[in-house]
Image (cartoon, rainbow, N blue to C red):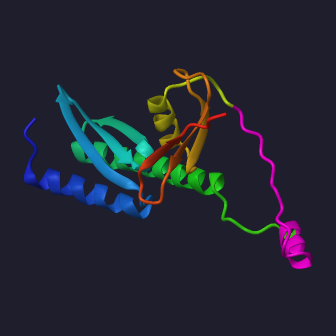
Amino acid sequence: MAVSQALSDYAVSKISSLSKYFDGIISVEIIMNVEKESETVELVAHLIKRKTAKAHAQSTDMYASIDEAVDKLKHQLTRAKEQIKTRRPPHKASPRRANSTESSPSLQEIIRTQVFIKKPMTPEEALLQLESYHRDFLIFMDSDSESLSILHRTKNGQYELLEPVY
């Protein structure tokens, strides 16, 4: 359908208000469709970390469909923002760690963490996996060399593959 300037301006003004609900929006696609008496709007928001949020609304009025789809998208963006906050709590020094450094500054505490390696993968698969995590490195079993490897994101945004030699 040919979109009027007023309808286009209305949709853009509604979409531009979404940034106050989630500041990680890269772009939003607006798809408007008219079939007989049904007018539908589909919104696809492209977010940071390669995530997307979709909303779909259908009614007899295009303006009402836009409003309903934007409300659905607001709800999804609010949930996405809350999930990010709960996944990455602010970093605080543990009291046990602070006490150990005060008593003997020359000793450093070793924190042990278990790492579960899911399956052997190629470095390209490991790169995709690392981009979906909120970490700077990934330890994985290289399917080509059948050895343990580490993929590390450097400070300048490039990736470094560490292959230990025994």
**For the view shown, which residue lies furthest in the bottom direction?**
102
The verdict on residue 67 being magenta is no
Q: Position of residue 159 (x, y in %)?
A: 45, 46
Q: Residue 42 sits in which quadrant?
A: top left
Image position of 153 with respect to 35: above or below: below
Quadrant where the N terminus lies? top left
Question: In the image, which residues are magenta?
Answer: 96-116
> Depth check: 3 or 91 in front?
91
Image position of 11 with respect to 148: above or below: below
Image position of 43 with respect to 157: above or below: above
Q: State the predominant SS element of the stretch in magenta.
A: loop
Q: Residue 53 sits in which quadrant?
A: top left
State the residue at coordinates (63%, 56%). Answer: 88
Q: Residue 146 sits in which quadrant?
A: top right
Relative to residue 13, is residue 114 drawn left or right?
right
Q: Position of residue 109 (x, y in %)?
A: 84, 62
State the residue at coordinates (8%, 48%). Answer: 4
Q: Position of residue 160 (x, y in %)?
A: 48, 45
Total labels drawn: 0
State the residue at coordinates (31%, 41%). Answer: 43
